[in-house]
Image: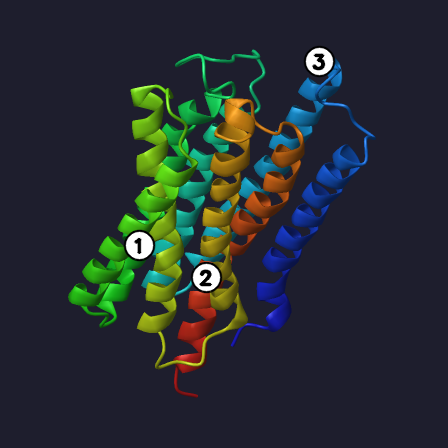
Amino acid sequence: MLSNPTFSRFSNIALLLWLFALTQSVMALLGVFSVKQSDAERILFGIVELATIALLIFNAFAIKRFVTKHDCLAASYFSKICLYSLLLCAAGDIVNRNFPQLFYQYDNVIKHSYLADSVLFFFSGYLILAIAIAHFALKNGLSKRLVGITATITALIALVTYHDMHLTGAAYLLTLATGAYSVLVSILALSAIWLIKSLQAYKLPMRIWCAALGLVLAMVADAIIGKFWIFGNEGQGYFPLVSHINWIIYFASQALIQQLPIGLLQLKLASKPD
């Protein structure tokens, strides 16, 4: 069986990158960087954030190369899904940096409407992840009825919650995009339960639990964006404070989610007869 350090190096890299992302945000919150007043610092800070997510992508690529060398279809499959999902989300991260300083693109209500432009990328990235987990859970014996009912209930709760924070006068296109996305990230968080429940017959490695937590944190991060960045402060948003808080949670979610294929490989190796 592969040694624990073989698995741990990918988790350690993800942890170190998250600590670096945490340091970035804490320094900004303490005023070491002033991304709101200085264009040069804002652009530099955004580039550093994107470089950090790029390093996380390299880690995901390394995980894929490592996992695909072993006979575990589920781990190999999710190593690709997690990588593709992260790549799509990273494209959304580029949009969210708002380097061209675009505001009020859809209406005169929502200042940071460029965040809705990134929904195309985040929606695609999280959608393939949610579908992959649902397929995996169903294949492992989870009831279609349970998946359907829980997804429907979650979608309804997400819509009610979205309605409470939505502002009157927001553009129809922005409302449609952010509303649909709210439903998706809520179902993504629900998929954490599908994942754990479908594997309840096994003693799960900690990395699978971490990945499930990452799925939930992805919803939390986007809930913060919706409540305080897009619709907060009567559409003005609490920028840049909320962007730094969101970055800490969002980066943690991505770092945790990419542990899933390693956890599945561990599970496969642990279940093999000696």
Q: Quadrant of the C terminus?
A: bottom left
Q: If you read the primary sequence from the N terminus, does the residue marked by circle 2 or circle 1 appear first?
A: 1
Q: Secondary structure at mark 2?
A: helix
Judge the density around disc 3: few (<14), some (14-19), many (≥20) Cα neighbours within 10 Å. Answer: few
Judge the density around disc 1: few (<14), some (14-19), many (≥20) Cα neighbours within 10 Å. Answer: some
Question: Could you say which is closer to the camera, residue 77 or residue 123?
Answer: 123
Q: Which residue in the protein does label 2 denote?
A: 212
Q: Secondary structure at mark 1?
A: helix
Foreground mark, 3 or 1, reads: 1
Judge the density around disc 2: few (<14), some (14-19), many (≥20) Cα neighbours within 10 Å. Answer: many
**Lateral position of residue 60 relative to residue 156, left or right:** right
- CA gap between label 2 and label 3 equals 38 Å
Q: Which residue in the protein does label 1 denote?
A: 154
Q: Does 210 sit above or below residue 64?
A: below
Q: For the point 62% across and 35% down, which residue is it?
A: 242
- CA gap between label 3 and label 1 equals 41 Å
Q: Residue 45 in the image: state x and y as whole percent.
A: 70, 26
Would you say residue 59 is visible in this rendering?
yes
Q: If you read the primary sequence from the N terminus, does the residue marked by circle 2 or circle 3 appear first?
A: 3
- CA gap between label 2 and label 1 equals 17 Å
Specify the farthest residue to the left: 145
Circle on res. 50:
none
Q: Quadrant of residue 180?
A: top left
Q: Amino acid at mark 2?
A: Ala
Q: Does 204 sit above or below residue 97?
A: below
Q: Quadrant of residue 8?
A: bottom right
Q: Which residue in the protein does label 3 denote?
A: 39
Foreground mark, 2 or 1, reads: 1
Q: For the point 68% across and 42% down, which residue is it?
A: 21
Is disc 2 in contact with disc 1, using a CB cutoff of under 8 Å?
no
Q: Residue 83 in the image: state x and y as whole percent.
A: 44, 44
